[in-house]
Structures are given as C-alpha cells and as structure tokens.
Image (spheres, rainbow, N blue to C red):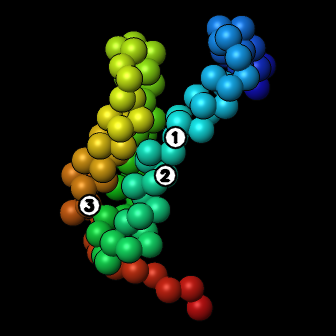
Amino acid sequence: MVGFGIVAYGIALATDSVYELVQESSSLGTSGILVMMLFALWGERVGGAASAFAALIVGTGTYLVCEHLLETDYSYLASLAAALIAYLALAPLGGGERRLMS
C-alpha cells in the first residue's frame, strides 16, 4: 500500500496541473471498459471473461505506452483500437453462453 502512495506522489509531482491528472486518470482504463461494456450490452454471445480481461489489460497498456513512451497525440484512440482487437482475438475462447441471474 505504501508503494502505491509513493507512485501517486511521484505522478502528482510530475504534472503541471490538476487538469492533467484528471485527464490522465479518466483516460487510463476506459478504453478497455468501453469495449467490454459495448460487447456485454449489445454483442450477442461474443467473447467472455478472457476477452474482457484482455481488453482491459491491452487497452491500459497501450495507453501507457503511447502516452508516456511514444508521446503520441492519439493515445486514447490507439488504446481503444488495441482493446477492440484484443477482445475480438480472444472472443472464440468465450464459449458464447450467457448466464441468467435467477
């Protein structure tokens, strides 16, 4: 837990404004969440847990690489595309069954 606090403190010192912190935090994992939720709501029997995890991990990783290592202007779009590709790549492993809550 202390390690996360130290990382958060380092990130806060490295930015110039609160706006940049809010922008970074809202962009970080939302591409994977967006892809996962769109397929969960409207993708009939496409993907499963493996696809959702892949979209979250690949989307977040792509955003971090594009934003901080490559310093591109289209980091969110690249992470959104990567999350979509990861979700669809692992969709055949999902099985296609839906569980209904009873």
Q: What residue would you read off at disc 2?
A: 33
Please tell me which residue is depicted at 46% across the width and 54% down the height of the picture: 34
- Report x, y in % for residue 29: 52, 40
Residue 12 image label: none
Q: What residue would you read off at disc 3?
A: 91
- Report x, y in % for residue 43: 33, 72
Find numbered disc 1 in the image and state the secondary structure of the residue it sits on.
loop
- Work out whether residue 28 or residue 55 is closer to the camera in this orientation and state it: 28
Observer-side mark, 3 or 1, equals 1
- Report x, y in % for residue 67: 43, 21
Q: Earlier in the sequence, mark 3 or mark 1?
A: 1
Q: What residue would you read off at disc 1?
A: 29
22 shown above or below 69: below
The quarter of the image holding the N terminus is: top right
Please tell me which residue is depicted at 59% across the width and 38% down the height of the picture: 26
Q: Determine the image quadrant of residue 76.
A: top left
Instruction: Check whether the beta carbons of the residues at disc 1 and disc 2 lie within 8 A of each other.
Output: yes
Residue 76 seen by the camera: yes
The kind of residue on which mark 1 rests is: Gly
